[in-house]
Image (cartoon, rainbow, N blue to C red):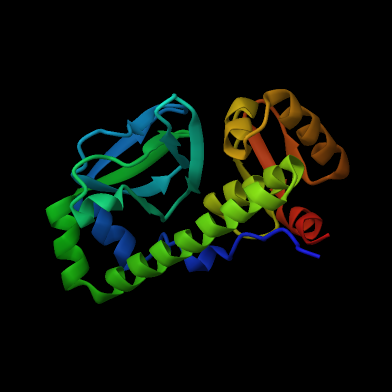
Amino acid sequence: MVTCTVPASDKLHRLSRSSDIDRLLASAGGVRTYRPAEIVFAQGDRASTVFYVQEGIVKLSAMSARGKEAVVAVLGVGEFFGEACLTDHPARLRTARAIARTTTVAIEKTVMLRLLSSHASLSTQFIAQALARTIRTEDDLADQIFYSSEKRLARVLLLLARSCSGEGPQRSLPKPSQEALAEMIGTTRSRVNVFMNKFRRLGYVDYDTGRLTVNATALQAMLRD
């Protein structure tokens, strides 16, 4: 039997908030804050900066020629995005949008390249994070092919829980809209509503108007069933 992929450990892709790397990046770029649903950059925009998430959650999505959107990544504290500009892509390949109130550091391409070449620890972390994201992308593709929308929602909730700061099985984060969750797993808002009510009844999640608490242990067990 094929089992659903459980998201990898936080340590594979997140940088320590107390690390020298975090402080180095904060001093090298400009801090920007975004409201929920605000666009950081759009597909096709000029690409000249790399972004680093200090607080909040960002989703990356691709838009087809017919206007259909597909979410390709959900990123949280300690993660980079927009790094394709480092490979001389002149335009953004994806759209980045804040899911919750989000603070980023925007680092110019030339500055980021200089930092990567002069700080081995940053370069190592950056490469490890890129590889971890590639693995997650492959896992997401498998989920879309093999698994039900209910299990895809469970996996997205684990990814969101992973993206927030904090430790332990119970993770609290800003509550995403059901529309946003539906976009991430390729289903309807009404289906997400049914699943979220079920998850809440079973103790997998709890939520109010502003916060979502995810029971990571329970959701991981569900995905392994």
Mark count: 0
Who's the residue at 76% across and 63% down the image? 2
Q: Considering only vertical position in the picture, is 99 above or below 1?
A: above
Left or right for 16, reference 24: right
Which of the 4 quarters of the picture holds residue 182?
top right
Q: Nearer the viewer, residue 134 or 158?
A: 134
Left or right for 112, reference 122: left
Q: Is residue 96 visible?
A: yes
- Residue 15 place in picture, x, y as percent: 41, 63
- Residue 47 place in picture, x, y as percent: 21, 42
Which of the 4 quarters of the picture holds residue 103?
top left
Left or right for 77, reference 25: right
Q: Nearer the viewer, residue 166 or 162?
A: 162
Of the 4 image quadrants, the one containing the N terminus is: bottom right
Give the farthest residue toward the bottom.
120
Left or right for 49, reference 224: left
Q: Considering only vertical position in the picture, is 73 above or below 115?
A: above
Give the farthest residue toward the front.
66
Q: Considering only vertical position in the picture, is 199 above or below 179?
A: below
- Residue 222 place in picture, x, y as percent: 80, 55
Who's the residue at 57% across and 52% down the image? 141
Which of the 4 quarters of the picture holds residue 126?
bottom left
Q: Is residue 171 visible?
A: no
- Residue 69 place in picture, x, y as percent: 48, 31
Who's the residue at 65% across and 45% down the image? 157
Of the 4 image quadrants, the one containing the C terminus is: bottom right
Who's the residue at 26% across and 56% down the image? 25
